[in-house]
Image (spheres, rainbow, N blue to C red):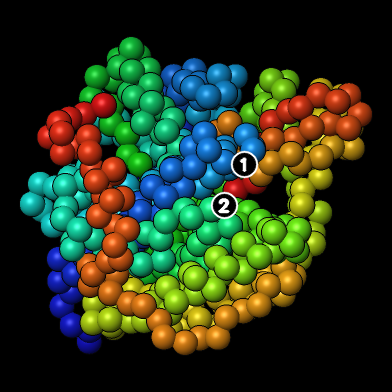
Amino acid sequence: MSAVIDKADIASYAIRWGDDALILSHRLAEWCADAPELEEDMALMNLALDLVGQARTLYTYAGELEGRGRDEDAIAFTREEREYKNALLVEQPNEDFAYAVTRQFLYDAFSLPFYQALASSKDATLAALGEKAAKEVRYHVKHSADWVVRLGDGTDESHRRMQTAIDELWTYTGELFVNDDLDRRMIAAGIGVDLTALKDSWNETVNAVLKEATLVRPADGWMATGGREGRHSEYMGYLLADLQYMQRAYPNMKW
Amino acid sequence: MTTVDARSKSREEQAVWAALAHVMDPEIPVVSVVDLGIVRGVSINGDDVEVAVSPTYTGCPATQLIEMEILEALQRNGYPKARVKRVLSPAWTTEWISEQGRDKLRAYGIAPPAAVKGRVSALLGEEAEVACPRCGSRNTRKVSEFGSTPCKAHYACANCLEPFDYFKCL
C-alpha cells in the first residue's frame, strides 16, 4: 500500500524537470543567429523548441495540479531565482561553441534514459510526456554526440577547446544522479525516476563518445550541487533577467 | 472514442471526418490533419463533438494553430460546441501518415519518412535511405538533421542537385 500522493509533490516534481528544459532551451536560444553555420543555427533552435514544448507540458500540468491559478507563463516567468530547481549544468554559460555542445551532450545522454524511464511512470501525464520526449531527445543526443566527435577528433584547436569544456563542465554532472527527498517520495509512489539507476546508461554513452572523440574522461572528483534546492551558480541571475524581462516589464502581457 | 475504421463510423462521424479532411497543416498546406494521422478520434454526443488530436512534436508552434483551425472548420460545418482534446499518449509517429499523405508530401517536394536500413551504430543511430522527391534517385545526402520545421531534415540530391526537405521518422 503506497502512501497518499500529495498533488503538490507531483507539481514540484513536474516543475523541476520543466526548469531543466526551459533553462537549457534559453541557453540554446542565445545562439540564435550566432551559430557557426546556418544549418547549426536551425538545429540548435529545433532542439530549443523541443525543450520549450516539454517545459510547457510540465508547467501546464503543474499549474493544474496546484489549482492556484498559475498557468505555464506564470511558472516560467514570474518565479524568483531560488524557486527554479534546474540542475546547475543547464545554466552554465555559452563560453564558446565547445561548451554549448558539451553541455548539451552531457545533458542529452542523461535526459534520454530519464524520459525513457519516465514513460513507465504511474502518473499518466508524466508517462505520456516521457514517451513523447524520449522520441525527440533521441535526435538531440545524436546531434550533440556528432559534434563532440567532430570537434574532439578535429583540429588541435577544436580538440583543446573540447577538452577544456569537458574538464570545466564535468563537476556539474554528479548532481544529475542524486535522488533527494522529493525524488525518493516520487520513486516510492511509482511516479518518479530513480536517478542513480540512470548512471550506467549515461556512462556507457559518454565513454563511447569521448573515446571516439579522442577526449579524456575527467576523474570524478568533487561535484557541485544545489540546483535542485534552488541554490544556483552566479550565472543564473543574469539568465533570468533576460528570460523574464518581458513579463517583468509588462506584467501579464500576452503575445 | 471511435476508431479510425471507416466501417464503424456513423453518418454524423463521417461528416466530421470529411470536414477535418479539409483542415490543412499550416506548414505543409497540401496534407490535411487526417492525412498526417494526428486526428486520433472523434466522439459525438448530441451536439457535443470532441476531436482528439496528437501533436507531432511537443514544441511544434503549429499545434495551437491546427487546433484553432479544426474548431473553425467544425463551427463552419454546424458544430458550434466542438472541442479539441490534446492527446500525448500514444505518442504520434510518422507511421500514422496515410499512404495518400505520403504521396501528397512527395508531390509537394518533401520526401516522406523512409524505412530504416538497419542500425549503423546503437548510439549514432540508423540512417534512412531517402529518395529524392523530384528525380527519385537514392543518391542523396543529409545536409542537416534539422530543417525549417521540427518534423523535417534537410537533404540534397547528388543526381539532380536539388536540395529538398525530408519528413523524418519519429
User: Residue placed at 23% from the left, 69% from the top?
Assistant: A231
Q: Are marks 1 and 2 on the same chain?
A: yes
Crowd rating for badge 2 (residues with CA inside 10 Å; few <14, some 14–19, many 20+): some
Rendered location of residue B145, percent (x, y)? 66, 44
- Let me know if residue A72 appears in the view: no
The dot on residue A97 is 2
Furthest-top residue in view?
A: B76
Q: Amino acid type of disc 2?
A: Phe
Rendered location of residue A30, percent (x, y)? 43, 43
- The local secondary structure at tag 2 comes to helix
* Label 1: chain letter: A
Is B125 in front, or is A89? Answer: A89
Q: Are marks 1 and 2 in contact (CB under 8 Å)?
A: yes
* Label 2: chain letter: A
Furthest-left residue in view?
A: A68
The dot on residue B45 is none
Crowd rating for badge 1 (residues with CA inside 10 Å; few <14, some 14–19, many 20+): few
In the displayed structure image, the side of residue A251 where residue A42 appears, left or right = right
Image quadrant in which you'd find residue A156:
bottom right
- The local secondary structure at tag 1 comes to loop
- Let me know if residue A223 appears in the view: yes
Measure the C-alpha gap from mark 1 to mark 2.
8 Å
In the displayed structure image, the side of residue B111 where residue A203 appears, left or right = left
**Upstream in sequence: badge 1 or badge 2:** 1
Q: Which residue is mark 1?
A: A36
User: Residue placed at 50% from the left, 81% from the top?
Assistant: A199
Name the quarter where the N terminus of chain A is drawn.
Answer: bottom left
Image quadrant in which you'd find residue B157:
top right
Name the quarter where the C terminus of chain A is drawn.
Answer: top left
